[in-house]
Amino acid sequence: MFQPVLPLSGLPGWALLNRTFESQSEAFNASPQIVRDTDYFVENIASVRTAEELVADRRLLSVALGAFGLEDDINSRALIQKVLEDGTADPASLANRLADDRYARLSETFGFGNALFGTNTGDFGFGERIAEQFRVRSFESAVGDQDQSLRLALNATRELADMAADDATNDTLWFRVLGTPPLREVFERAFNLPTSFGQLDIERQLDEFKDRAERVLGVENFTDFADEAIREDLVQGYLLREQVAGITSLSAQSIALTLLQG
């Protein structure tokens, strides 16, 4: 398996990753394991008609979860099956009750709980679309194995570009950010919000995100994130604060070690 080359972290690492992204991601996606897994998924997913069948096949499930950044749930088969079977039409369904919005997107995309139209697994191009999502997120995950902040930066850049093209309402898109932990972490750090911020009422959190987005980034509507420069400003703000936090943490550890040695 090809591993991304990331000799630098923070803003220098981000600049290097952007310069080499195309070549590194192509090399990663050409790795035998990635090719085998995606080929298997494309060849077999159309025959899967129920959530139970999907979770019973670990190779298919691995690609399905990885495509939504939920690969850590590979052993939570009962949870995933319930999420998929419930669908998203009912506000009380499990996917809608979970704090992480990625479960709802997984359930809606596969459509196992859609009583009206049924599953989407047999739709033309479905397997290829999910496989491509898997490739993209798998590369981001490989980056995260070496530097989690760079993984979150990649994820935010991609997700925000996609969301800005969505025809959902402004507040709906902001709620999606609040409900997606990797995205939320980038915004909270970039906006210098305290760890206690998540304890506020959700409407208050929404207002604060929108207010800071306008003050810090000049974002008046979520569609403004279609601008690459605005996404870059957000990511650079996040990475800069991550660097500062890391330096502060190391300094505190050095002082503590000095005191202990003294």
Image: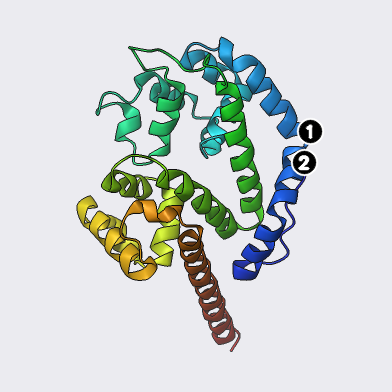
Residue at mark 1: 32
Residue drawn at (27%, 64%) of the image: 211
Q: Give the vertical position of 33 relative to 156 (above or below).
A: above
Q: Position of residue 58 (x, y in %)?
A: 61, 23
Q: Give the vertical position of 63 relative to 182 (above or below).
A: above
User: Hey, what amino acid is under mark 2?
Assistant: Met
Label 1 with label 2: CB-CB less than 8 Å? yes
Residue drawn at (56%, 53%) of the image: 154
User: Hey, what amino acid is under mark 1?
Assistant: Pro
Quadrant of res 250: bottom right
For residue 209, side relative to residue 42 (left or right): left
Q: Residues within 10 Å of mark 2 (few under 14, many from 20)?
A: few
Q: Nearer the viewer, residue 20 or 74?
A: 20
State how the image is colored.
rainbow
Quadrant of res 84: top left
Location of the C terminus (image quadrant)? bottom right
Q: Position of residue 191 (x, y in %)?
A: 38, 67
Q: CA distance from mark 1 to mark 2?
A: 7 Å
Earlier in the chain: of badge 1 and badge 2, it is 2
Give the SS element for disc 2.
Answer: loop
Residue drawn at (42%, 43%) of the image: 165
Give the SS element for disc 1.
Answer: helix
Mark drawn on residue 1: 2
Q: Position of residue 8 (x, y in %)?
A: 69, 67
